[in-house]
Image: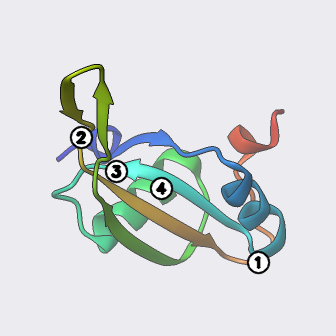
Amino acid sequence: MNRYDIIKRPVNTEKTTTQKEVVNQVTFEVDQRANRIEIGRAVEEVFKVNVAAVNTMHVNGKIKRKGKTLGKRKDWKKAIVTLMPGERIEFFDGV
């Protein structure tokens, strides 16, 4: 699996913004087949930072309704990556 296939997109919410500022953690949507080691290596190679820890979780898609029709959003995997002290990802800082 390619390192660019593992990291799909960053997750930007109020909570992830606070985590970035307070405890130096960034959050990504990742491939469901990727494990913690692969995710950590991919983040290190793509963003040129040192990773301290990786926590992962599966997020179940919500059931949504439009009129009489029921639908379901896709299930996805989230990775919370803790960076080493002093490390930053410029992509998230708006630079």
Identity of the amino acid at label 4? Val
Instruction: Give the percent coordinates (x, y) of residue 31.
Output: 25, 49
Q: Earlier in the sequence, mark 2 or mark 3?
A: 3
Q: Which residue is mark 3?
A: 30
Query: In terms of secondary structure, where does tag 4 sit?
Result: helix
Separation of residues labelled 2 and 3 (CA atoms)? 13 Å
For badge 2, the amino acid type reads: Lys
**Of the residues under marks 1 and 4, which one precedes in the sequence?**
4
Give the spatial CA distance, label 2 vs label 1.
Answer: 34 Å
Q: Which mark is residue 85?
A: 1
Q: Nearer the viewer, mark 2 or mark 4?
A: 2
**Pick the front one: 10 or 6:** 10
Q: Which mark is residue 43?
A: 4
Circle 1 — which element? loop
Figure quadrant of residue 65? top left
Asked if labels 4 and 1 touch by Cβ distance under 8 angstroms, the answer is no
Tell me the amino acid under the disc marked 1: Pro
The residue to which callout 2 is attached is 74
Residue ID at (67%, 57%):
16
Going from N to C along the chain, the mark reached first, 3 or 1, is 3
Of circles 4 and 3, the one toward us is 3
Cα–Cα span, label 4 and label 3: 11 Å
